[in-house]
Amino acid sequence: MIVSLTSRIVRTVDPTCLAKIAWNFGFKGARSVLLFEQRMKRGEFFPPFLYISILNSCNLRCQGCWVDVDKPREAIKLDELNKIVNDAKKHGNSFFGILGGEPFMHPELFDFLAMHPDCFFQIFTNGQMITEKAATNLRKLGNSTPLVSVEGTTTVSNERRGGKDVLNRTLRGLQNCLDAKLLTGVATSLCKTNIDDLLSVSWLNKLIDMGVHYTWYHTYRPVGPKISPELALTPEQITQVRRFVVEQRAKSPIAIVDAYYDHNGKALCPMATGISHHIGPTGGIEPCPIIQFATDTVRTDRDLYDVFNESAFLKDFRETAAQHTRGCIVLERPDLVKQLVQRHNAPDTTIRQTALAEVSAMTARTSQWREEEEIPEKHWMYKVAKRFFYHDFGVYKDMKPESHSPKF
């Protein structure tokens, strides 16, 4: 598997892109995690990976989206984006996730990428705005990987994403990325209407035949203003996803990403461990993308290292989450999210200004934490990488097991 995947990447990805992946993401990314651990030992905090939603606008209207895509545009300006990255670089960071809305609708996206050749960016996109010219520009810059979202078959894609001919337009953008020899991934938010089609060996083989290099399975999270609870996976399906990912990592010549388990199959939350936090399109520094509250902002003259390190809100969120669940605090304990927001008087960072009411109305449900269903990694590469660079960093030692939410 690993030989076949490596060979395919070397043959199909532009050499400049490969070099920047190896250095900016591989070496420097690993170093940023080691620096993060050293900071934790000193009692200091700054996440090694930042995810930035650079604007709220989008050309689609997906079911269950928590971003204000139908509201007036809010965007992080170029000078603010540069401040975020430059402040982070001073403390060893080199990898950033770029989200939206649809990032390719940001008028200064390419200028931003060009200003940071010493970093690597993963761009979460629906792919529909990646023209041949856009893909060529990304290849010239060489410092980003598009992660294109595919949500199902033709019918399901139209239904899930609120448009017409959604799948074909997405696949055209995906193909433009592959033709430009970019390291290219496909992401899927698994839900009840697409799990049978996309959590399958046949789908992985189709991606491999197309030339896709990696895939990322998320699970649909029913949050936001228009929750679609009927789409949420059952606890058994959540375990099915984990088992499939572990098995195919050891068999299929395509990299498969996950963000919610360590090498032993124990659940974790990237926010609770502190390995990542999120910056929203209004500049608020949020615990994660689905927690749309913030007491701090990137729109400040202070070094962001100091802002993150001194944020009582973020610290309380991390510690409270780690004490009560190895899973998602929003899904399992929305009552605690509400308490945290009220305790810190944290402003709603959405444009719609209804986030607290949405959290108050949520029903607790199972997330990725299923203690009786821990499935360790099978492939040595994933096991080693996670053991050293993606684990719980010891934050769950004081967890209260009696507070684990009901399984439904």
Image (spheres, rainbow, N blue to C red):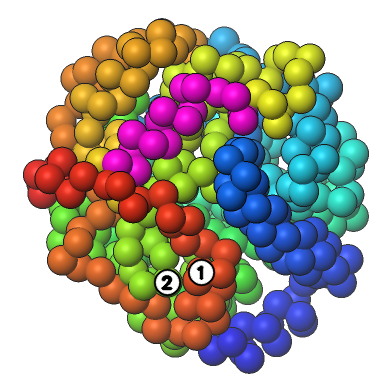
Residue 315 inside the magenta-drawn segment? yes
Q: Which residue is mark 1?
A: 386
The image quadrant of residue 240 is: bottom left
Q: Position of residue 397 (x, y in %)?
A: 33, 53
- Screen quadrant of the N terminus: bottom right
Crowd rating for badge 2 (residues with CA inside 10 Å; few <14, some 14–19, many 20+): many
Q: Residue drawn at (65%, 53%), measured in percent from left and top?
A: 38
Give 175 or 280, whichever is nearer the viewer: 280
What residue span does the magenta drawing correspond to?
308-323
Is 326 drawn above or below residue 228 in the view shown?
Answer: below
Is the stretch drawn in magenta largely helix, strand or loop? helix
Q: Residue drawn at (30%, 47%), measured in percent from left and top?
A: 398
Give 273 or 222, whichever is nearer the viewer: 273
Badge 1 amino acid: Lys
Q: Which residue is mark 2?
A: 263
Give 16 or 120, whichever is nearer the viewer: 120
In the rendered image, the residue lying farthest to the front is 42
